[in-house]
Amino acid sequence: MSASDHRLEKHSVAIAGHRTSVTLEAIFWRALKSIAKERRRSLSELIAEIDSRRGEMDPPPNLSSALRVYVLSQSRAGRA
């Protein structure tokens, strides 16, 4: 892991027809892009899918946390 992996990056994504900004470490953005590519989906589509699942949790986590947990769970399952 390098110092650049920890660098925070802010990206604007479209979710359910509206734009929002999400800030994550660079290493998480790379993992999300890789997962989206593997699934032949856009990054926005993948994030929207993850976002829709947040509502099933009580209380729902913020989007950045949900994305980090998703990447970790995919990594543990051997998919990232």
Image (spheres, rainbow, N blue to C red):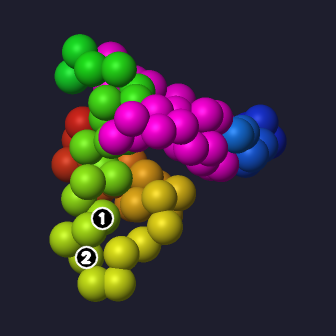
| Image: 79 above or below 64 | above
Task: Please name the residue that numbered disc 1 is placed on.
Answer: 54
The residue lying toward the viewer, choosing from 30 and 66, is: 66
Q: How many marks?
A: 2
Residue at 21% across / 22% down in the picture?
Answer: 39
Q: Quadrant of residue 43?
A: top left
Q: CA distance from mark 1 to mark 2?
A: 6 Å
Q: Is residue 21 left or right of residue 14?
A: right
Q: Is residue 1 visible?
A: no
As drawn, the label of residue 67 is: none
Quadrant of image for the N terminus = top right
Q: Quadrant of residue 52?
A: bottom left
Q: Residue furthest front?
A: 17
Residue at 47% across / 39% down in the picture?
Answer: 18
Indicate the amino acid at tag 2: Met
Q: Classify 10 Å Cα crowding around label 1: few (below 14), some (14-19), many (20 and above).
A: some
Across and down, in percent, residue 72 comes to 38, 54
Task: Please name the residue that numbered disc 2 is placed on.
Answer: 57
Q: Secondary structure at mark 1?
A: helix
The residue lying toward the viewer, choosing from 14 and 17, is: 17
Q: Which residues are magenta?
A: 11-38
Residue at 70% across / 40% down in the picture?
Answer: 10
Quadrant of image for the C terminus = top left
Q: Secondary structure at mark 2?
A: loop
Across and down, in percent, residue 58 comes to 28, 84
Residue at 49% across / 67% down in the picture?
Answer: 62
The residue lying toward the viewer, choosing from 65 and 78, is: 65
Across and down, in percent, residue 77 comes to 20, 49
Indicate the amino acid at tag 1: Arg
